[in-house]
Image (spheres, rainbow, N blue to C red):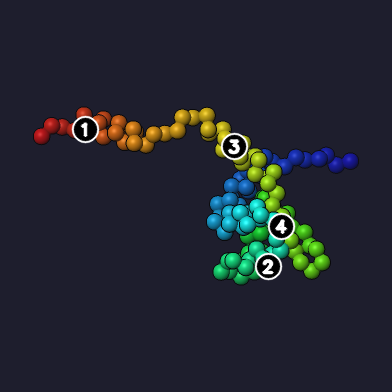
Amino acid sequence: MAALHSPDPQAALDATFMALADPTRRAILAMLLEDDMAVTDVAAPFAMSLAAISKHLGILAGAGLISQEKRGRVKWCKLEPDALRAASVWMQAFGQFEPLNLDAFERFLESDLACDLPAD
């Protein structure tokens, strides 16, 4: 019997973030939040070819963010929300730090730099 290999979690996380890096793919995921959609319906709002949309869908499916199923002659896309869990957990780890107050940081830099400047 062949040994079962679990997918590399780092590779899966990389694939998720790579898929999310593109605005078209993020828009597709937002559309699929509402309901499953046929590929042609997914493509309708975009000013690109069906082949280009199919490539985007392939990347999303490869990352496990969507699944595709053929029903009759129509290929349907379904959001797989659990696939975002690892990315969400990874990002939440950064929530342990205090949010940076940029205004206070800017004031600190201005006062610190003012002290270091030679007097005229």
Crowd rating for badge 1 (residues with CA inside 10 Å; few <14, some 14–19, many 20+): few
- The answer to whether the residues at label 4 and label 2 have Cβ atoms under 8 Å apart is no
Q: Amino acid at mark 4?
A: Asp
Q: Amino acid at mark 2?
A: Thr
Of badges 2 and 1, nearer the viewer stands 2
Residue at the far left: name it. Answer: 120
The mark nearer the N terminus, 2 or 1, is 2
Q: Which residue is mark 1?
A: 114
Q: Amino acid at mark 1?
A: Ala
Quadrant hosting residue 6: top right
Q: Which residue is mark 3?
A: 90
The mark nearer the N terminus, 1 or 4, is 4
Q: Which residue is mark 2?
A: 40
Under circle 1, the secondary element is helix
Q: Residue at x 74, y 58 (%)?
A: 68
Under circle 4, the secondary element is loop
Give the label on residue 36, or none. Answer: 4
